[in-house]
Amino acid sequence: MAAKNTVSTENGEIFDESEGELVDSQLPVACHEKRHFGNIEGSKLCLQCWRMKERMKTVSVALVLCLNVGVDPPDVVKISPCARMECWIDPHTMSPQKALETIGSNLQKQYERWQPKARYKQSLDPTVEEMKKLCVSLRRNAKEERVLFHYIGHGVPKPTSNGEIWVFNKSYTQYIPLSLYDLQIWMGSPSIYVFDCSNAGIIIDLFKTFTTQREQESAQTTAAQINTEQSVPSSIKNSILLAACGSTENLPMNPDLPADLFTSCLTTPVKVALRWYVLNNRSLVPGLTMDMVDKIPGQLSDRRTMLGELNWIFTAITDTIAWNLLPRELFQKLFRQDLLVASLFRNFLLAERIMRSYNCIPISSPKLPSSHQHYMWQAWDLALDLCLQQLTLKPISPDGMTFIHSPFFAEQLTAFKVWLDYGTESRRPPEQLPIVLQVLLSQVHRVRALDLLGKFLDLGSWAVNLALSVGIFPYVLKLLQSSAKELRPLLVFIWAKILAVDPSCQTDLVKDSGHKYFLGLLSETTAAPEHRTMAAFVMAIIMNNYAPGREAALKDNTISTCLEQLSDPNAHLRQWLALCLAKVWTNFDNARWCGVRDRAHEKLSKLLSDPEPEVRAATVFALGTFVSRSPDRTDHSVAVDVNVGNLLVTCITDGSPLVRKELVVAFGGYVSVYISQFVNLVKRIQEEEKERMAMSLDMASMFAPPRPVAASSHQLSTMTTSPSTDSLGDERLVIRRVSSGASITGHTFVTVYSSMWQALNELAADPHPQVAVMAKSVVDAVKKKASTTARPRQVVQAVVTQNNHSIASSPSRPANMPLGTPPQNMMNASSNQYSINHPPRKVFEKIPSSTQLEENKEEDNSSITDKVNTQFFEWSCRYFSESLMCLKKDHDPESKAYHQRQYRFLRNARIRSQGREQMRAGVNRLDDQMFVNRVNAVPTAIKFHPYENFLAVADSYNVSFWDLEQGTKVSELTNPAALERASQPLFRASRITSIDFMNPHDIALFMFCTEDGAIRIYRNFLSLNEYERELVTAFKGLSEILPSERGSGLVTEWEQETTTLITSGNARIIRLWDMQKETKICDISTGADSCVTSLASDPLGKSLLIAGCGDGSVRLFDRRLNPAECRVMTLKEHNSWVLKVHLQRGSEGKIVSACCDGDIRFWDPRFTDSVRKFNTPTPLSSVDIHPRADIIACGSTNQCMTAYSPTGTVLSTVKYHEGFLGQRIGNASCMSFHPYLVKLATGSADCFVSIYTTARNIPPL
């Protein structure tokens, strides 16, 4: 809801009528994108090992039944009646032999349901020899795979304390002990053992003992002495054991249960669970009988039937229990490594639950935590109850298809959704995750399950790791074979999340032709751009550093698919299309030639002027990889590379360091491919420079008379003046450096290599340090290569005597080389680059042989590309590893950042209200000095923060921030341009000429501009820790600026309402920058022969632009017109340098201008003549005009500061600092009003900063 002083405009903006500006919440925020925070690098993800180190399969199964049907073992006293059923067969209903064979056959069928492809061998009432033969044979055939040994010892004595189980002699007259020690030898490793007999727990304990013993013996025996049958010692780590009960427990004898209850639980879990449920709950369900258990219709393998659905629910529940209880590594080993082992352990959880109710505790090795009371068993009981209730109410059709399906999965998905609504990384993982995996198998719940799974994966990389560890991967891989269109958005989102965390999945996608699924989605132009963006990302990951992926993508026309959509309105899609193209032809010449045929580089070139920096960076990245790396380059290939190089050079003035860094990388790759051309270019440039300098020395020696050793400052200035003159004024020019990085346009040759070399040298002096360092490393590498591959030549040493003129420094000679005789080491450093006609001869330099050069060529070229690289691609991938569905913190009403932002807006409103109170009270004086402090140098610019109580003061070298309440300096930013030249006395530092606060209504950024055209923007500039002060961005705001001793430098005007930065200064153009997009909007010619000294604009009308110039003219521009025709008026009533132009706020805003000679004029933009004027009695050095109050502050050249009303009435005059014996104030070097309050900050030539305000009689709010 708008406040009482606000109105809504037609375009939805909320306008504050009292202030004539947008309210804070409507103001855009500049330089606040992802690229402006942190380093451009990939995610530091901790990928958990979710893949099986080695997949295993149980290929052989030994079913050993020692039942001796009809004869009870001597150490077991059985009750009557007691459990008799074995594998659901009553052995007393048939002959003993037939019963034994039937039981064995049934057991095999029960196992085949879990693992139909295994090799099964039955051993019915075996002897020791038969056991040995069976085990050895199975191990031999299984090789390194797993063997299952299932032992049912219901007809033999219990295992002995010596570690023996029992078998028979040939005539079945005696029980023969079989040592576990021998069994380990025969079975080898890996193996799984199932012991279904009383006191089975003793086997587990002794098995471990024998394993330890065998490992010790194996360590003491050499491999040559070990029998081949004993060559694979069994390790407890590779052996899995399941035992029916503890070492002192007997098997249950309840006649309602099968005798092989443990085996039945492992092989027929649903049937056992149903019978056990009926036994315990039939009194609660009227009409429920045991016979109904066998009448449940359907097939276990058909999930559409009642019995199949129960089996499906059972699998989901046991998987969930295991995943929630077991350590991840153990879960992977037991429940994901081997299908048969996984089935046995899922069923083992049921065995523990059922057998514990009969005082038997099944034992396993590795040991599992107790699970018999897990709450998910209640869900299982409910599912059984709902199923059996249907049997009691009405008959079910024999096919089992017509029944009421269980709500289990729908309810579990709802529980999962509830967790998602409140889930975070700090909470326990959702217990329903394994169930979501199972639900993916159902067409009924699949869409909902995929939607919830995607939301879970969106929580972060930890969620992806959890999902992969639970086994989601093969399911979502299989779903790529589905043709259902409704699944495409969900699957592409899920796969984008998976590949962002684990790119190695690319191999699985290519192997199963999964990439075609995403290419199909990418080619559908009717699909949502967000989904196509994810498809492009998936394709880029598939091709990244993976040759089979690139080949598969090229085969399926990825290049043409991407090129067709480069003009899509969605910026993120354009970015990833460019990155996808880059990955398909990186180090893949076939794809590159395919791109050449499709004119890919020409189509991509249109994106070099894209409004989004990420798109431009991706385009530069793609063009950089488009340069041929093939050693066998044809003329056509070189011609294409030349075109690409020319395209890349045009990006040098891009406003985003993100783009310029990619440009340096592209240049580095280009240089490494065409290193010989660049080396020859550098040599040629150096030769021409040497010739020029030799000619200049000859000319100087012909006309210059002998001079004393020390030249006067005037003479030095004359000798070292740049050959070109500065037409912006009569200011004295500084020395200009001559180097191999100087402008190449003055040389006799200009090629793509020379253009790129000049661009590299300009980038080596980039305001952004990372760009500069990268570019300098390429430049230095080429120069080093040029020096090491130079031909033998006579190297002479330049002897500069006291009578010689000084020579401008080379790149290897510092610019601060003092005139006169240079140090010997500096002469040696520069001797290989300059040859002068007259010095004495030196010996020839020793150079590497051609063989050495050839050996080092490839290594040197690769070192260039190694020195310049970025993680832009990896950084771009980070987008998909982070949450895409959550609200940004700034917009989340429950976040701390949101509340802090709202507080700032309220604070800002209070400040503006306080300013309005001051305006209403009236301003009749401005001489109350509330702050004074000395600074280190003469201030060149000064600025109040609009809403916080501190002041920014800039001099040539630093910007200091002052706390106005405490009167102390808070922090300081250093001008890098001043640091670089601090040790160069002949070269004046690039002074700071303009400062401003960006986003002051929110989290402010600080911008300072230097006279070399550089603009730097900082965050955390008030931090005491200099390492916390971050450079947000830096760029050349005006590369055409001309150096001068006395000039305006770089002049700027910041429009927060439009995030437009207007720049001008010692140039004949005004350049407008869109700081949201970090791109140039347009260049406007000033039409003046002098510099621009002051700028003003109308941020709300977004049309009027005013420039004050050094020749006294005031020029008006209408930005709505074409830049070449937008100068609408030139006002020429001033006769000297314009110090200030100001546009008053409001719909009828008037223009105010002031010049050095004290002439202050008021203009109506509708007329060419001023409407009012007044003159100050003395010339002015600085002027500022309050944006809201009717007050003009003027600093005169006679050490006086005067405040005037618009009519020219003197409000107050300040000549001295306040206090007893207050000294005279200095000439004002700069001054600035507070945007809302009546406060004036002044900087003076005597290095003092003062703040003046009106009389302090206004009560604070």
Image: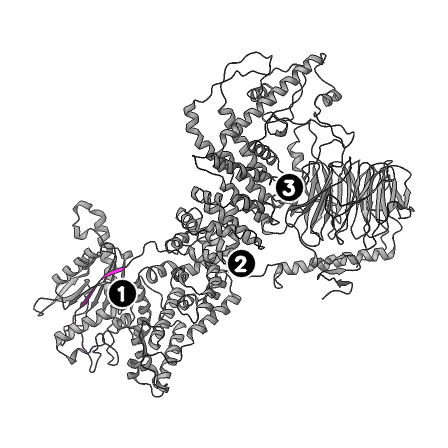
Q: CA distance from mark 1 to mark 2?
A: 43 Å
Residue 302 horizontal side relative to residue 575, left or right: left
Residue identifier under label 3:
1035
Quadrant of the drawing holding the N terminus: bottom right
Let me know if residue 927 appears in the view: no
Q: CA distance from mark 1 to mark 3?
A: 67 Å
- For marks 1 and 3, the one nearer the N-term is 1
74 is within the stretch colored magenta: yes
Mark 2 nearby-residue class (10 Å; few <14, some 14–19, many ≥20): some
- For marks 1 and 2, the one nearer the N-term is 1
In the rendered structure, find residue 145 and report the number of the disc placed on it: none
Residue 511 position within the rendered picture, expressed as x and y whole percent measured from the top left: 37, 54
Let me know if residue 647 appears in the view: yes
Residue 581 position within the rendered picture, expressed as x and y whole percent measured from the top left: 49, 48
Splitting the image into 4 quarters, where does residue 357 fall? Answer: bottom left
Residue 820 position within the rendered picture, expressed as x and y whole percent measured from the top left: 66, 18
Q: Give the SS element for disc 3.
A: strand
Q: Give the SS element for disc 2.
A: helix
**Identity, as a three-letter code, of the amino acid under mark 3:** Phe
Question: Are the two marked residues, 1 and 2, in contact with CB atoms closer than 8 angstroms?
Answer: no
Residue 694 position within the rendered picture, expressed as x and y whole percent measured from the top left: 62, 17
- For marks 3 and 2, the one nearer the N-term is 2
Residue identifier under label 2:
530
Give the extent of the magenta segment: 57-84
Image point (46%, 61%), residue name: 491
